[in-house]
Image (cartoon, helix red, strand yellow):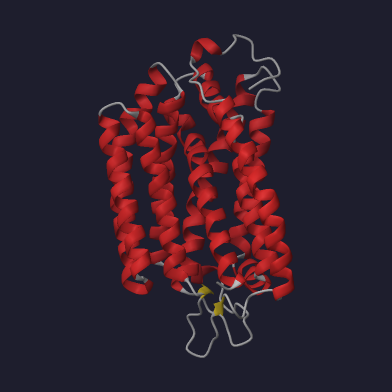
Amino acid sequence: MELTTVWFMLIAVLWIGYFALEGFDFGVGLLLPVLARNDTERRVMINTIGPVWDGNEVWLLVAGGATFAAFPEWYATLFSGFYLPLLLILVALIVRGVAFEYRAKRDDDQWRSRWDVAIFVGSLVPSVLWGVAFANILRGVPIDSDLEYVGGFFNLLNPYALLGGVMTLLLFLTHGALFIALKTDGEIRHRARALALPVGAAAAVAAVLFLGWTQLETGTVGSAVAFLGAAAALLAGLAVTVRGREGWAFVGTFVAIALGVAGLFLALFPDVMPTSLATGTSLTTTNAAATAYTLRIMTVVAVIFTPLVLAYQGWTYWVFRKRIATHHIPAAVGAGR
């Protein structure tokens, strides 16, 4: 297998990890004003993702770095053509991270309320725009024969891309609700589990429409299998939610998101960024790739360090695996979350 294909697969795995893990903490942020009835409950929800949210974002950083090093033409065209939406995502992630850290720095209701809004907005913007961005990559954008993006921002706001944004938003809401149900106890747990069912049903409809549209336009046999697996996993997760099996329900949404993203990359390959122009040139794993020497060095580094990163992140989830409830939250805000 060529190293260009290997690195396309590795980048796909990084995005799978990012969406499957960051997806649930986006969902928690989105549900903060919905499920929590008071500040103590909001602190419970934030604490469910407090130890892991920044580790989840490492997947995004590595995916971006791997794309820059392995496929520089892809990186350059993507970040020039999608400059505004990617900038909005970056600003939202920065604001969201600051909000997690600063929310508890003052014992003031208005102060905390403003940071809660920042957490919500910082979760909403990426949840929608990541779906819009990936939908446009699949659909194809105006790329000329010099491999340069020649469209504008409003080229990205098409029905297919907007449907992709709705799908990711609903999937992350469902994923987050099931994570809250899995990680909390008491009233929040029951509210989250109850909300997961209607939101999950809406997510299933959006996913069927978007993935079906994708399959008709650019799908392959491999993507069809992945999409069917994603649909089955999502429905299975919703089914066991009714029985109160939050752990298996969360596994269902996790697998659904992972298989859905895998299917999108299978539908994209061997392109990395197709053109929508008749006279344009699509970016592929061949013409967008770095030199063979660069890819070999990257492969050696990845083989050494990837297991270490995975082991550390797995250890983090294991250490903070227990449920939390309102009685675990001290009365005073103090310096913690």
Quadrant (top left, top right, bottom left, bottom right) of the N terminus: bottom right
Question: Is residue 254 rendered to the left or right of residue 333?
Answer: left
Q: Give the residue at the far bottom of this rendering.
A: 279
Q: Position of residue 272 (x, y in %)?
A: 54, 72
Question: Residue 93 lies in what quarter of the image?
Answer: top right
Can you give x and y, in whole percent of width and height, for residue 261 in the image? 45, 57
User: Could you tell me residue 71's position as x and y percent?
Assistant: 65, 70
Where 207 falls versus 242 (above or below)? below
Expressed as whole percent of the image width and height from the top left, the position of residue 185 reads 42, 18
Residue pictured at 62% horizontal, 39% vertical? 311
What's the residue at 41%, 21% (across, down)?
Answer: 188
Q: Is residue 36 left or right of residue 153?
A: left
Residue displayed at 51% across by 26% down: 45
Task: Answer above or below: position of 89 versus 268.
Answer: above
Residue 210 visible, this orientation: no
Answer whether residue 241 is visible to the viewer in this image. Answer: yes
* Quarter of the image where one finds residue 135: bottom left
Q: Residue at x 74, y 64 (%)?
A: 297
